[in-house]
Image (cartoon, rainbow, N blue to C red):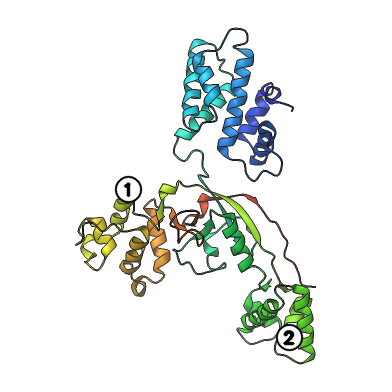
């Protein structure tokens, strides 16, 4: 397929690509936009612009050939790359074309018109936030029940963590990878080698000590362990046996590109005041009678704070919620808060990452409360687990 007009002659195929498999869409879009194969990502808006451009060119080539273009069509063509305005102009031109009979209601043209309306349907385009995730694991789908297998701190709430900055995600990948990982459960490991309970964790700590000493070089780590074995050092035998049996691995780590199917306005902003709709959602989560003057942020949301000029940030509100949902009474209150916020249509938390926090501007990290709003678009790395030799 050499150009967009070639594509126009294939209406059923074009429609199937538009509505079908994502990989087909990506490959086609790279062709019609002229992007190189190594392009980082293709957005739904890119695809929409390219396909609508094709439709306009087809219309111009066929219906308006030799007859001059209507001003609305000229405006649509000249502004189609401008989000919002170009979409409005395109829809107006389509409506005029159908009413006048200048634009034929073919499947392709009707499909392009429908796609032109997508940006005005809340959530229809999906994947509003592009982000990255660095991990030592292979991931087919990010799951809430896997929380705690990564860095584990959960300092900004209970959820799945992602970074707007690819560099931040790569740093997490590097930090969390190059650690010893068992291919069996800790209990099965202890049973397999006839060790007392808890031995697997202690063995992994010892292996990581040798790995750090060798600056992550697996071959050097094994050489050091062999020397330790010759000197009857503790755990050297068990570690080398686990390596020989293929039970102990060292993951290289993976970096995933994701779409987060939320608008930033749906997230609690850790570093900024809450919008009015989120204020009301928070107030609906709590019992007004239980909020005393000790809850500065919640009192402010109620309009009852002693200082009327005090405006709490998302962090202030979250801190008050941790006190309100007392851990001694509710157990894991961070998990409870995330569930309550999610039920209140607040889908996660956003906060400045370490590179941006001091400046108060820049890239953000995201904490997602709903695994079904996370779509892996293309893993940047698909490294297999590397077994030490």
Q: Using the image as rendered, state which of residue 121 and residue 31 is in the foreground.
A: 31
Q: Quadrant of the C terminus?
A: bottom right
Residue designated by label 1: 277
Residue 232 is left or right of residue 344, and the answer is right
- In this picture, is 244 found above or below 365? below
Q: Using the image as rendered, state which of residue 195 and residue 25 is in the foreground.
A: 25
Q: Is residue 135 visible?
A: no
Q: Using the image as rendered, state which of residue 321 and residue 144 is in the foreground.
A: 321
- Direction front: furthest residue: 359
- In this picture, is 311 found above or below 334? above
Q: What secondary structure is marked by label 1?
A: helix
- Direction bottom: furthest residue: 232
- How far, Cα to Cα, is label 1 from label 2? 59 Å
Q: Using the image as rendered, state which of residue 278 and residue 57 is in the foreground.
A: 57
- In this picture, is 298 found above or below 225? above
Percent position of residue 231, x then y: 77, 92
Residue designated by label 2: 236
Q: What secondary structure is marked by label 2?
A: helix
């Amino acid at each position: 397929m050499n150009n967009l007009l070639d594509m126009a002659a294939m209406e059923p195929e074009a429609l199937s690509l538009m509505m079908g498999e994502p990989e087909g869409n990506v490959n086609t879009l790279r062709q019609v936009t002229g992007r190189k194969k190594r392009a980082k990502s293709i957005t739904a808006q890119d695809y929409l612009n390219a396909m609508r451009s094709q439709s306009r060119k087809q219309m111009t080539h066929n219906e308006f050939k030799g007859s001059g273009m209507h001003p609305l069509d000229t405006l649509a063509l000249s502004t189609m790359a401008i989000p919002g305005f170009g979409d409005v102009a395109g829809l107006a031109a389509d409506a005029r074309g159908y009413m006048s009979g200048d634009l034929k209601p073919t499947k392709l043209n009707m499909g392009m018109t429908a796609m032109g309306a997508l940006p005005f349907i809340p959530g229809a385009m999906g994947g509003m936030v592009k982000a990255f995730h660095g991990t030592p694991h292979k991931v087919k789908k990010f799951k809430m029940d896997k929380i705690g297998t990564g860095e584990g701190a959960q300092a900004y709430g209970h959820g799945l963590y992602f970074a707007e900055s690819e560099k931040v995600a790569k740093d997490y990948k590097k930090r969390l990878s190059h650690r010893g990982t068992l291919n069996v459960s800790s209990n099965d490991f202890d049973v397999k080698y006839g060790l007392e309970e808890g031995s697997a964790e202690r063995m992994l700590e010892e292996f990581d000590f040798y790995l750090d000493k060798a600056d992550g070089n697996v071959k050097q780590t094994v050489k050091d362990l062999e020397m330790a074995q010759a000197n009857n050092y503790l755990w050297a035998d068990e570690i080398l046996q686990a390596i020989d049996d293929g039970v102990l691995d060292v993951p290289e780590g993976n970096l995933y590109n994701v779409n987060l199917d939320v608008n930033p306005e749906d997230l609690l902003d850790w570093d900024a005041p809450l919008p009015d709709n989120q204020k009301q959602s928070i107030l609906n989560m709590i019992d007004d009678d239980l909020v005393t003057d000790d809850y500065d942020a919640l009192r402010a949301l109620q309009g009852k704070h002693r200082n009327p000029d005090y405006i709490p940030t998302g962090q202030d509100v979250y801190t008050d919620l941790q006190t309100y949902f007392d851990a001694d009474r509710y157990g894991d209150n961070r998990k409870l808060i995330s569930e309550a916020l999610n039920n209140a249509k607040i889908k996660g938390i956003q906060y400045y990452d370490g590179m941006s926090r001091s400046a108060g501007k820049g890239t953000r990290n995201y904490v997602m409360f709903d695994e079904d709003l996370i779509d892996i678009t293309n893993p940047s790395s698909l490294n297999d687990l590397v077994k030490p030799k």
